[in-house]
């Protein structure tokens, strides 16, 4: 089927030749960021990540750095920031008794309930500081407390570490926090499922392996059947890194299902091939009175594996020959 460019009605954006020259080198996020900047002029990483649905603000920052190096963007000198109307009070100096904000009382009470223990004065001050100084909404803070407690941690310090992860992922609202947690739990279930296929537990996976396994599902859209198929191809090299290479190759070829992989002729039938393993004791395998030299030379290349269909065809031919005889 042939295509042609549809008529445009004034809704076009000029794309510099510089961007066109980098199409084969820039990744998908970088290209999307460049086109969005050309259309809107927006260069704030947080706004770009939200508008384009990027995985994190860091992805937007990397794209901005890429285009700055390519010459599409120019770094500006940081302008002096105006003094805030009221400077943030350090957490240790927050006087909880004089705060009239009703959210503070609710936050402190509910946080202790979620964390399952009474918090010290310094812990409460630090928690309230996340709300007053860092701008975290109370509902997001309470969600974070519940998540930290589910992980077996019960301190405000653990809440702070978790908030850093949420901030890097672009979480700002309660809805975004719920979506982030749902994706996180789905990723944990997927890692556990894949780890079982490798005969290990999810706790045995390294950080790199977890990232690679998440990519199989979230970016390449492979399911457990494809992972099992890749393990068959891996044979003795049953490592996450080796299987990652197999799946990467299939993704590059557009092979997204087991049927498509088998259709390439790499494996046939049920993927169970008949192989012949040489006996450990050649003389014993040959039987009494037969010299070991009578067996095939094990230094030669082994005979190609045959599928069950080929073996069945040969058996049927033998039966037909016997019947005719």
Image (cartoon, helix red, strand yellow):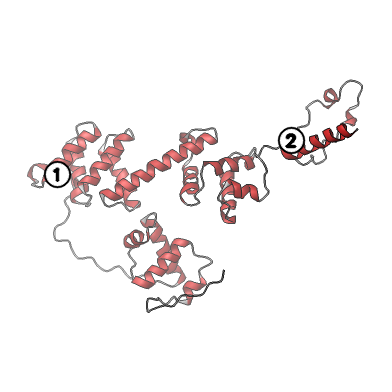
Furthest residue toward front? 324
Task: Select label 1 or label 2 by which is in front.
Answer: 2
**Mark 1 packing: few (<14 Cα in 10 Å), some, or many (20+)?**
some
Q: Name the side, left or right, on which 34 lies relative to 105.
A: right
Give SS at disc 1.
helix
Depth check, front residue: 261 or 251? 261
Question: Residue 321: x, y in percent?
Answer: 87, 35
Residue at 57% x, 40% y is 228
Q: Which mark is residue 275?
A: 2
Q: Name the side, left or right, on which 301 lies relative to 308.
A: right
Q: Is there any visible trace of residue 258 in the rendered image?
A: yes
**Mark 2 packing: few (<14 Cα in 10 Å), some, or many (20+)?**
few
Q: In which quadrant of the rendered image does the N terminus lie?
A: bottom right
Question: Residue 237: x, y in percent?
Answer: 62, 40
Q: In which quadrant of the rendered image does the C terminus lie?
A: top right
Q: Which mark is residue 12?
A: none
What residue is pinned by disc 1? Answer: 104
Furthest residue toward bottom? 10
Depth check, front residue: 120 or 21? 21
Within the image, what quadrant is residue 105 found in?
top left
Depth check, front residue: 231 or 203? 231
């Amino acid at each position: 089927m042939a295509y042609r460019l549809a008529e445009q009605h004034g809704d076009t954006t000029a794309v510099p030749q510089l961007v066109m020259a980098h199409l084969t080198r820039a990744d998908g996020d970088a290209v999307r960021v460049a086109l969005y900047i050309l259309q809107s002029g927006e260069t704030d990483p947080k706004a770009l990540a939200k508008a384009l649905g990027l995985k994190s603000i860091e992805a937007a920052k990397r794209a901005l750095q890429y285009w700055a190096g390519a010459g599409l963007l120019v770094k500006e000198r940081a302008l002096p920031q105006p003094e805030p109307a009221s400077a943030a009070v350090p957490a240790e100096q927050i006087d909880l008794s004089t705060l009239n904000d009703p959210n503070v009382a609710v936050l402190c009470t509910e946080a202790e309930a979620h964390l399952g223990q009474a918090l010290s004065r310094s812990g409460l001050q630090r928690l309230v500081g996340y709300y007053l100084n860092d701008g975290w909404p109370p509902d997001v803070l309470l969600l974070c407390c519940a998540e930290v407690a589910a992980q077996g941690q019960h301190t405000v310090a653990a809440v702070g570490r978790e908030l850093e992860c949420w901030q890097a992922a672009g979480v700002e609202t309660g809805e975004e926090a719920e979506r982030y947690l749902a994706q996180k739990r789905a990723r944990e279930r997927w890692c556990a499922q894949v780890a079982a296929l490798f005969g290990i537990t999810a706790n045995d996976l390294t950080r790199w392996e977890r990232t690679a396994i998440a990519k199989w599902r979230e970016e390449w859209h492979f399911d457990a059947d494809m992972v099992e198929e890749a393990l068959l191809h891996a044979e003795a090299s049953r490592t996450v890194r080796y299987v990652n290479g197999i799946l990467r190759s299939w993704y590059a070829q557009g092979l997204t299902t087991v049927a498509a992989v088998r259709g390439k002729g790499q494996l046939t039938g049920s993927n169970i091939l008949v192989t012949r393993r040489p006996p450990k004791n050649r003389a014993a395998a040959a039987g009494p009175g037969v010299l070991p030299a009578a067996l095939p030379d094990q230094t030669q290349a082994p005979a190609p594996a045959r599928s069950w269909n080929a073996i069945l065809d040969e058996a049927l031919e033998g039966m037909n020959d016997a019947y005719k005889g």
